[in-house]
Image (tube, rainbow, N blue to C red):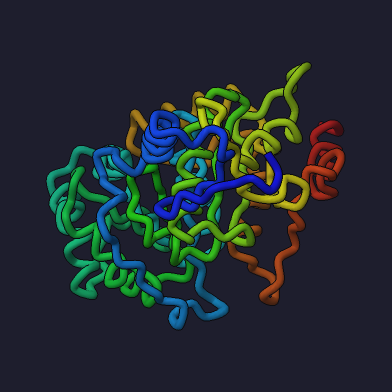
Amino acid sequence: MPGINMQNEKNDIMMPRANMNETNFNRVADNQNQFINSERNYNKEEKIVDISSLLTQDKKVACFVGTSKNGTSFVVNNVAQVLSSQGISTAILDTTKNRNAYYIYTNNEEELRNTAMTCFENLTNGVAKGIQVNRNLTVYTSLPDDEYLDNTEEILQTLIKNYSVVLIDCDFQTPISYFANSQEIYLIQSMDILTIQPLTAFLNVLRSRNVLDEKKLRIILNKAEKLKKVNDKIIIGGMSSYNDPAMTYMVDLFDKNLIKYISIPFDEQVYVKYLEGIIDCEISLKGYSKNIIQILTELANMIYPVKNGKTTYRPPTVNSNGFTPSINSTLEQMRKY
């Protein structure tokens, strides 16, 4: 009810006074804290460090997060391939609970496993020693529950000093300080509307900790398909606010009409090649369709501009129609073949 609100001081939640009996209050608090009280307890005091002085014009730190199975690691791994192929010094920091990068990039080799096991400890001590994937790409991962991951300030300082781009593969258990110190946060979302709720609940946790900065947010619609009842605008609209499952309150997270986004269509050929790459412990763009490579290149350019310090890519907003000119050009070339 407009003008009749009461504030929950702990989480900065606005809800109708009429619903503020003890039972409803406790239920709302439980829903709000479903991620805070997960295996990684966000209720504990976590120091939010500030490393903004290290982020010069030629440095970039970006977080990528989404609900499980929406393709966060797919995006991070492939964008890293594009950036490194352009000669840009790139690092992947795996902060996920499952540490998927550990199983992909160690290639079942004891030497690489030993390197991975000491990755975070070395970063904490100022040593940038990770898994060297190629000349311009290094991966930092470890076994699950590595205690050194909490040393956000030391880890990011070491990475920023040694690499031009740091791509952080995140999940809902990643320490909040990584999001606070990223210049951009990319939200990975598929057309599966049931995966929106966990993502928005996590974003609401960031909001309650004063970490959610709308200007940092970008959306990547992954595995996009043309559906009769759901399009980009509807998906982004659903992501723009957090709705309590009990429908007790709603919180706006960002302006759905202004946020920048890019769409990666589902391509069975690319999906198969990526799965084969995971099995072979070798991620490569070889065998990807020209359209997907073009989109991944535009996304990489969106993250780290490579021409005279200015990006050539202008991400569309939800009010934009059709493809970008570069994608149209690529599609036109494909039609001629």
Quadrant of the image for the N terminus? top right
Work out whether 322 lies above or below 140. Answer: above
Residue 79 left/right relative to 133: right
The residue lying at 37 percent from left, 56 percent from top is: 176
Count the marks. Answer: 0
Task: Locate residue 296, reporting x and y percent.
Answer: 62, 46
In front of the other: 32 or 185? 32
- Is residue 292 visible in the rendered image? The answer is yes
Front-most of residues 132 and 165: 165
Residue 334 in which image quadrant: top right
Taking the view exactly as shown, the residue that stands out farthest to the top is 228
Would residue 81 be seen by someone viewing this image from the given angle?
A: no
Q: Residue at x 26, y 45 (%)?
A: 40
Task: Give how far across and how far down residue 268 sits, in percent.
Answer: 59, 22
Up/down of 177 relative to 5, above or below: below
In-front residue for pair 185/291: 185
Q: Note whether 214 is above or below 240 in the view shown.
A: below
In percent of width and height, residue 87 lies at 52, 65
* Picture quarter with the C terminus: top right
Residue at x 71% of width, y 66% of height: 311
**x and y, in percent, of residue 320 in the image:** 84, 44
Answer with left or right where residue 320 lies relative to residue 25. right
Q: Nearer the viewer, residue 207 or 142?
A: 207
Q: Quadrant of residue 309?
A: bottom right
* Residue located 65% across and 42% down the image: 240
